[in-house]
Amino acid sequence: MPNWAYSDATVTGPKESLKKMLDYGKDHIRHFSDGDAITLGSWIPRPETYDKYDTTNYPNGEKLVIGEKYNDETITEELIERFKQATKEQREKYGAVGWYEWNCKNYGCKWDCPLCIVEKEDSIEFSIQSPWGIPDVWYKRMSEMYPDLVFTVKADFELDDQWYVLEWRNGVFTQLDTGYFEYVEADEAEIEKAEKTVREALNNTDDDGLPF
């Protein structure tokens, strides 16, 4: 499992530009692991070659074994040759070999990620959970695609006590603020009360472990 990064964004600017950005995302729903969703790729889609040829794990067709299967296709010399051509094309045309390198260069994180979006009268808010880092490259590119919108992002990371407030305007990044989370020590009496409640609940069950 990855260490997750969390970013909560507020996008502000002219209403017509906010609507244009949101409508574009709604018109480009992506198939995701848990179903269809608006994702990073709704605005910046990964070229099909990266899904067809997994050159992250099989660059130039290396490690493919003739006679075995790749995506329901029997591996042949011809398929390996196609992998070699795809590797060359990806490098020359997109500057990245394999979906992993492309994602990092175009999103700033390992995977495409869904957005949890809330529409407000004068802004759009959305949350993104992304692996090992926030999609900072995506925020930069989005601010270039919609130069009259401001992307203000509050970010934090697993295993990190710090939070950050970041901003992108027309491709320009600014760190607005940073700080540390405050942790309050639990009250011993409250802990004991909670433990007592749990013990009582466990004692009041039938043989199947269900409450009476």
Image (cartoon, rainbow, N blue to C red):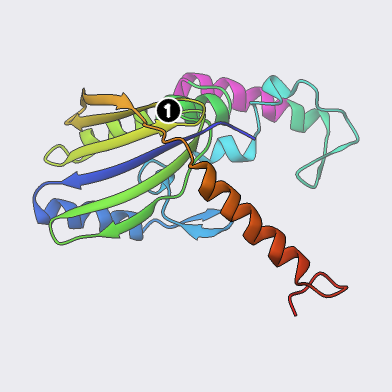
* Residue 141 shows in this picture: yes
Judged from the image, the secondary structure of the residue bearing numbered disc 1 is loop
**How far from the left and from the top, in percent, is residue 193?**
57, 54
State the extent of the magenta-drawn residues as a range.
81-95
Residue 148 highlighted magenta (yes or no): no
**How far from the left and from the top, in percent, is residue 144?**
21, 33
Q: Main secondary structure of the magenta part?
A: helix
Instruction: Give the residue number, with chain letter if any, for mark 1.
Output: 108
**How far from the left and from the top, in percent, is residue 86?**
61, 28
Quarter of the figure with the N terminus: top right
* Residue 33 shows in this picture: no
In the image, 128 versus 23, the foreground residue is 128
Residue 89 highlighted magenta (yes or no): yes
Side of 159 relative to 19 (left or right): right
Query: Is 119 rendered above or below residue 205?
Result: above
In the image, 149 versus 75, the foreground residue is 149
> Residue at left 50%, top 31%?
158
Query: Is 109 rendered above or below residue 151?
Result: above
